Image: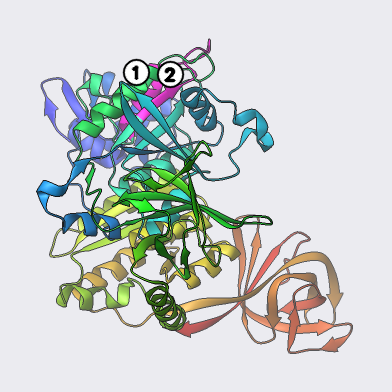
Amino acid sequence: MSSNGNKIELPGSIVVRDLAQIIEKSPIDLIKKLMSNGVMATINQSVDFDTAAIVVAEYGFEAIPEVIVEEVIETGEVPLWRQVIADENESDLKTRPPVVTILGHVDHGKTSLLDAIRETDVATGEAGGITQHIGAYQVEMKGRLITFLDTPGHAAFTQMRARGAQGADIVILVVAADDGVMPQTKEAIAHAKAARVPIIVALNKIDKANANPELVKKQLAEQELVPDEWEGDTMVVPVSAKNKQGIDDLLEGILLVADNTDIRANPQGEVIGTVIEAELDKSKGVMATLLIQSGTLEIGNVVVAGTAHGKLRALTDYKGNPIKKAGPSMPVAVMGLNEVPSAGDVFRVVESEKEARVIVSERADEAKAQSQTKRKTTLEDLFENVQLGETKELNLIVKADVQGSLEPIVSELNKLGQGEITIKIIYTETGNISDNDIMLASASNAILIGFNVQADVSARRLAEKEGVDIRLYEIIYRMTEDIEKALKGMLDPVVKEKILGRAQVLAVFSASKFGRVAGCKVTDGELRRNAKAKLYRGTDLVYEGDMGSLRHEKEDVKEIRQGFECGVGFKSFKDIQVGDQLICYVLEES
């Protein structure tokens, strides 16, 4: 934040106390000005840029957005195929077609844009117009090919990264000019930035009467995607998928970005690539769509993809035409694998089927061992990893209950990352922790920080499977204290909550011993007597303590499993209401 005469630079949000200090006015006077403008804020609360700009204008200042220059820090591991290409001789590397994936909000026109590019009509044949599969296509522009991955969203894109694939060279971010940047848009931006691939914005639906391109560009700038016409480095191309307007400009933009990016491969080198999709066809057997990223794939090659392997019997291009071989950046459908590989698996060609069976057997054993001991970055082992030279950064994803909580949290966390270990906040958003957050954390080797939020049941299960560390806090200073201790190597083993089950209160009864008893149905897992309990009313926590009693059909029981009904009593708590949500948990040291 700085000032230049009557002009002052302000961030996207600022604490009232700090704003008063910048303009050298009393915080009390500033609060009065805010109140006169209909904004009720305390000295320690944050206000957004627009509100701050209005208030400082009354003191004779002109507010301009603060320009933040931030070092880009690489996250995640380098994809295997990039490592292979890095070992090739420079003279053997040839320019290959760029591989492009399209991300964005669910109804901003991703599939319709691909329709316009391919001059096909895929969207009308899909349920609700939403992409139901992963496909790969190639188009030609000025005699050059461009490969498009038609993914069902950033979740699949991130799953590829989590598996070490990272199939795309360039991301097209579709944003509707009549709707602007939405939560899913922000999430897609985070996934693309974490993958460290160039982003081109396709500003769709500009033909609509209520389109507001300038407002959308401002929203993009707030997400650190500053349009090139604003002297930024993000290409923003106005398009209308419906009217096929601006499509050529978008394709030319892709080629321009590709020319400024090192997109090369050795057609004669080791054959390696990514599984785009795979299925079991009743008549043809296992069918898999592969994207070659190095080398040339041919009929008769022996391929290993995850724990699938086989000798290729047939190859077809994306149009369904039989071919004998396929080079870098070319999508190809293959037959001959013994089982269905997973989308995002890295495939490579080996010398013989015997070698393939040995590799698959070793991978199966390794996967079994990893499933038992899988562990990624946690706060406890962060300092040890730094000492061993394994990491120099801490990647964080922050989820909070409200937007007003995010700014001070991010501000405090950024203050901590000034020493030997750099803190990189990959993504921030309001709401409970979801599966998408877990996949992003897994792909980026990040720790999930939650403030006054919960982790969904499926998200907790996925986190356990992926080895993602989730930290939940209700007080900011405890969060910063934990991270500061971790950075200094002083964090003690943490006592974590292990959720046993969840239940919903269907009725409330009176009982002589406990006064009021919750009549519940167990919706997930199990409830245990003498375990800990939390009772939520909506998003508000109304009780936290021990479970006093657990009864089933007038009998005291030790546990109640999913699907059964029971009566639950709480010691010294009687304010139970129908609709309350019960969480049963135990404390474990990790």
Residue 341 in the figure: left or right of residue 15: right
The x, y position of residue 410, in whole percent, is 31, 51
Circle 1 crowding by C-alpha within 10 Å: few under 14, some 14–19, many from 20: few
Image position of 259 (left or right of 223):
left
As drawn, 21 above or below 455: above
Helix, strand, or loop for circle 1?
helix
| Percent of width and height locating residue 110 | 50, 32
Q: Are marks 2 and 1 in contact (CB under 8 Å)?
A: yes
Farthest residue, direction top: 209
Residue at numbered disc 1 = 249
Task: Identify the amino acid type marked 1.
Answer: Asp
Residue sitting at 46 percent across and 77 percent down? 496
Residue pictured at 49% horizontal, 72% vertical: 464
Q: Which mark is residue 239?
A: 2
SS category of the residue bearing label 2: loop
Which residue shows up at 35% across the image and 33% down it? 146
Screen quadrant of the C terminus: bottom left
Which range of residues does the magenta coloring cover? Answer: 201-222
Q: Quadrant of the N terminus?
A: top left
Q: Is residue 416 magenta?
A: no
Query: Relative to 479, is 95 above or below?
Result: above
Q: Is residue 324 visible?
A: yes
Q: Return the x and y of residue 294 as percentages of the image width and height.
A: 28, 52
Which of 196/388 is in front?
Answer: 196
Q: Position of residue 180 (x, y in %)?
A: 46, 27
